[in-house]
Image (tube, rainbow, N blue to C red):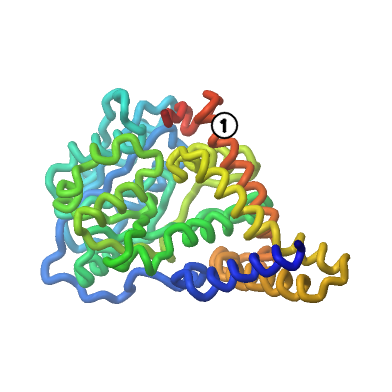
Amino acid sequence: MVSVLALVMLAIWLDLAFFWRGFWRCDVVLPENARAPAQWPSVTALVPARNEARTIAATVAMLAAQDYPGPFRIVVANDSSEDDTREAALAQADGNPAVRVIDARPLPEGWAGKVWALNEAAAAAGEPDYYWLTDADIVHRSGVLRKLVAAASANHLDLASELVRLRCRSLWEKLLVPAYFYYFALIHPFRAVADPKSRIAGAAGGSLLLKRSRLAAAGGFEAIRKEVIDDCALARAVKQSGGRIALGLARDSHSLRGYDGLSGFWAMIKRSAYSQLGFSLLLLAGTLACLALTFAGPPVIAVAAAAQRNLAGLAAAGLASFLMWWTYRPSVAHLNLSGAWALALPVASLFYGAMTLSSAFAHHFGRDNRWRGRNIVTK
């Protein structure tokens, strides 16, 4: 039995390492030096903000500092914040005609909060050529928008997105954040996302440049109004409508949000993990089994095989463990961590399994599932 499990794990890891679009390589970035368009299109940044008083000022300041050559405006949609988000955003808008702060209308039934705030911001944005969707806790260096627009224009993209860098300082962040990058790329291999022949679509809402006309063709924000994972749903809608999309890793955009303890990170995953599975108990069971077999299993089986002096099982499980470590190292290095943290993926997988299970419990048993001070409605 040990030998059979070891061989199954090895087959899985051989497939992931060499045949799943190189998802683990962390080398996919949007073109840095794409040819500038003959005329720079107009862009409006849409910033949904709920209870972001600690970060919104820095976010708006860095947006306003973009060295973009074309028409550029910023619309912050205050989504019924319970703190000083509105006041902090207004302070940044004072004296800057390019920055507008609006109060989103109360959240209607049937809409996810962030999608509604984006819809409200878009309604106030006029008719720019592109929307730049970004979160209220993300900061971008001055050349980011110029690069995004140049890459989109040169490659005829309707949606260009970058997965921004997350903070990785605390113990929990070092354990869980690299795995977040790794699993995201596993589910949405960047090369497959950019392939028009592939049905795989993905995007990252922290930095997402979207052609306004293509959004309209895809049904507008109303088409994804119920989606908790709004960025990937938007990418899917754009791709299904015939649009071209691309996704890369960001070098000059990062999140200000940190997770010093487990609870905050747990809440982030809990709010969306079961939604990612389409609220399917069958997919939940399969996901938990895959996390256990694929990520936690190889080192466990290797130890069991060693205890039984099963050399064939030890060799297969050992090689599977090596391939797991080898493919995970780029994600760890991307976040400037020691390669030793790559050995922690089996432990991280157990936490992700538990967080996914808690997401399903919240959905089926009405458990509290709050994010930004608002209960996430998934039914």
- Residue 345, position in %: x, y? 65, 59
Q: Quick one: quadrant of the N terminus? A: bottom right
In this view, 277 is above or below 79: below
Front residue of 117 and 379: 379
Under circle 1, the secondary element is helix
- Residue 26, position in %: x, y? 49, 69
Left or right for 357, reference 4: left
What amino acid is labelled 1 in the image?
Answer: Phe
The residue drawn where x is 75% and y is 75% is 315
In this view, 28 is above or below 183: below
Front residue of 342 and 137: 342
Quadrant of the rendered image containing residue 4: bottom right
Q: Name the residue under label 1.
A: 361
Q: How crowded is mark 1: few (under 14 residues within 10 Å), some or many (20 or more)?
A: some
Residue 72 seen anywhere in this rendered image of the structure? no
- Residue 378, position in %: x, y? 43, 31
Left or right for 124, reference 165: left
Front residue of 306 and 116: 306
Q: Quick one: quadrant of the C terminus? A: top left
Quadrant of the rendered image containing residue 30: bottom left
- Residue 374, position in %: x, y? 45, 27
In this view, 35 is above or below 251: below
Q: Give the tally of numbered discs.
A: 1
Left or right for 209, reference 262: left
Left or right for 104, reference 53: left
The residue drawn where x is 15% and y is 49% is 217
